[in-house]
């Protein structure tokens, strides 16, 4: 059997970290993942939203280093669980259980993407000195 999911998207809200009665960390958050397909009606990319839950050290890591708007890569599995709501109705939810998460962008680009001032615009790269392919050290082993 195979149940593996890899998603890359932006957090739609700050992650919420709680502790269970047995002092185990659990973190819940949701991410928005843009599709590569552009909608013909709106001429914009369509977006899918996924609920994610993480446990233990992964939950603590997410709570410490991620916030709303940050890009995250989630590797995990799909899980369907059932519960009774406040009115006693049976409900079910499908969510991603995160086993591993990765930063989807560098800290520098994340900071610049959260600000919209012209001061935060990327600066042009410094000029690269001229490179002469004929000026190569002959002692290289390759």
Image (cartoon, helix red, strand yellow):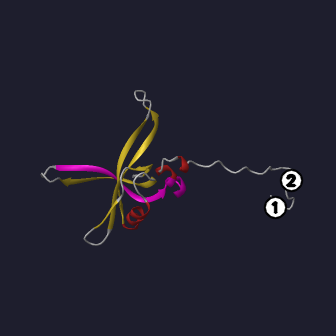
Residue 135 got which mark? 2
Q: Nearer the viewer, residue 118 or 12?
A: 118
- The total of numbered circles placed on residues is 2
Which image quarter: residue 39?
Answer: top left
Q: Which residues are magenta?
A: 90-111
Label 1 crowding class (10 Å Cα cut-off): few <14, some 14-19, many 20+?
Answer: few
Q: Residue at x 82, y 60 (%)?
A: 140
| Coordinates of residue 142 in the picture (x, y in percent) | 80, 58
Crowding around mark 2 (Cα neighbors within 10 Å: few <14, some 14 to 19, many 20+) is few
Q: Is residue 47 above or below residue 42?
A: below
Q: Position of residue 94 (x, y in %)?
A: 30, 49
Q: Which mark is residue 94?
A: none
106 to the left or right of 131? left
Which one is earlier in the sequence, the residue at label 1 or at label 2?
Answer: 2
Kindly indicate whether the residue at mark 2 contacts the one at mark 1 (C-beta within 8 angstroms).
no
Q: Residue 136: percent from the left, percent from the top?
A: 85, 55
In this view, which residue lies farthest toward the top? Answer: 41
Secondary structure beneath label 2: loop
- Between 21 and 97, the one lying in front of the other is 21
In this rendered view, identify the residue nearer to me: 79 or 89: 89
Left/right of residue 64 with respect to residue 90 in the rendered view: right
Instruction: Judge whether residue 106 is colored magenta.
Output: yes
Q: Residue at coordinates 86% horizontally, 53% vertically from top-left?
A: 135
With respect to residue 60, does 130 lie above or below? above
* Overall secondary structure of the magenta section: strand
Residue 79 in view: yes
Residue sitting at 38 percent across and 42 percent down?
Answer: 48
Label annotation for residue 141: 1
Between circles 1 and 2, the one closer to the viewer is 2
Give percent across and percent down for residue 47: 40, 40
Residue drawn 27% across the image and 50% down it = 93
């Amino acid at each position: 059997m195979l149940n593996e999911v890899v998603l890359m998207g932006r957090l739609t809200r700050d992650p919420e970290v709680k502790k269970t009665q047995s002092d185990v960390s659990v973190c819940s958050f949701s991410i928005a993942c843009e599709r590569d397909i552009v909608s013909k009606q709106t001429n914009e990319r369509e977006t899918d939203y996924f609920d994610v839950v993480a446990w233990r050290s992964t939950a603590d890591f997410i709570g410490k280093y991620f916030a709303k708007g940050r890009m995250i890569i989630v590797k995990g599995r799909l899980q369907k669980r059932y519960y009774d709501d406040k009115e006693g109705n049976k409900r079910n939810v499908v969510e991603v259980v995160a086993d591993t998460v990765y930063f989807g962008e560098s800290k520098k680009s994340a900071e610049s993407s959260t600000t919209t001032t012209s001061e935060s615009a990327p600066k042009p790269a410094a000029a690269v000195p001229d490179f002469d392919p004929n000026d190569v050290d002959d002692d290289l082993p390759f």
